[in-house]
Amino acid sequence: MTPSSNPFAHEIESLTIAELYSLGDATVRALLAEFVPLTHSSEIAIWAKDPDAEQLVALLDTAGPDGGFEMQVTQPLTEGVVSQVYRDQMNYLDHGLWRDKGHSPLVDQKLHQMTQYEMCVPFHLAGHRLGVMSAVQLTDSKHNAPSRWGFDKLDLQLLRLAALALGQAMERALLVKKLGH
């Protein structure tokens, strides 16, 4: 991989999960939420590779800090669609998770929900491979049904744009922290 020309790339590599989480300021969260209806999702999340373990950590989610997901759910790098996207650095668009043998039930079990559809894209911050952005359509008591069931290629393109926009917004949040504002 070619080294990033972004001045924050090296710093991103040294941030802890807690420091990465702190980049999820109000601007970042509002931007993340704007992509939910555009992609026909129930929720969108950013997963980050834990620098101290072979797992992904649920970093930010449109349900917010009180949703029971952020910083509380992990996914081993060896199982599940999200981890596969992180390992392979390839987009993922499913055709119904009940058909997908790669889907891990861990998150659904922890949050008492049922994921019906999922799409994922690699997530980079300052040119550094940070994790994965995932969008899901859920059936549970906390979410309304999406405007339509299933994701398509346009939804996946919008999720890729969301990952780029959120990466830039988190870089802005890092700059603000560094400047002490």
Image (cartoon, rainbow, N blue to C red):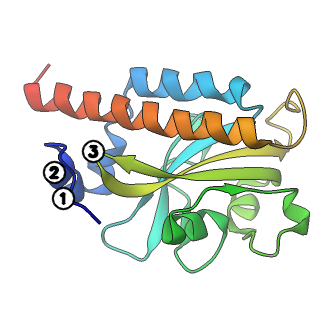
In this picture, residue 181 sits left or right of residue 57 = left
Q: Is 159 rendered above or below residue 72?
A: above
Q: Quadrant of the C terminus?
A: top left
Residue type, mark 1 in image: Ser
Q: Which residue is mark 3?
A: 126
Q: CA distance from mark 2 to mark 3?
A: 9 Å
Residues marked 2 and 3 touching at CB (< 8 Å): yes
Q: Are marks 1 and 2 in contact (CB under 8 Å)?
A: yes
Amino acid type at circle 3 is Ala
Q: Which mark is residue 11?
A: 2
| Residue ID at (32%, 36%) | 23
Q: Choose the circle earlier in sequence order: 2 or 3.
A: 2
- Rendered position, 17 above or below 171: below
Query: Which label was assigned to residue 103?
Result: none
Badge 1, how many Cα within 10 Å: few under 14, some, many 20+?
Answer: few
Q: Which residue is mark 1?
A: 14
Q: Is residue 85 above or below residue 118?
A: below
Tell me the mark number nearer the camera, choosing from 1 and 3: 3
Q: Residue at x 81, y 45 (%)?
A: 138
The earlier-in-sequence mark between 1 and 3 is 1
What is the crowding at mark 3: few (fewer than 14 residues within 10 Å), some, or many (at least 20)? many
- Callout 2: few (<14), some (14-19), or many (20+) C-alpha neighbours within 10 Å? few
Q: Circle 3 sits in a helix, a strand or a loop, which is it?
A: loop
Cα distance between the residues tagged 1 and 2: 5 Å
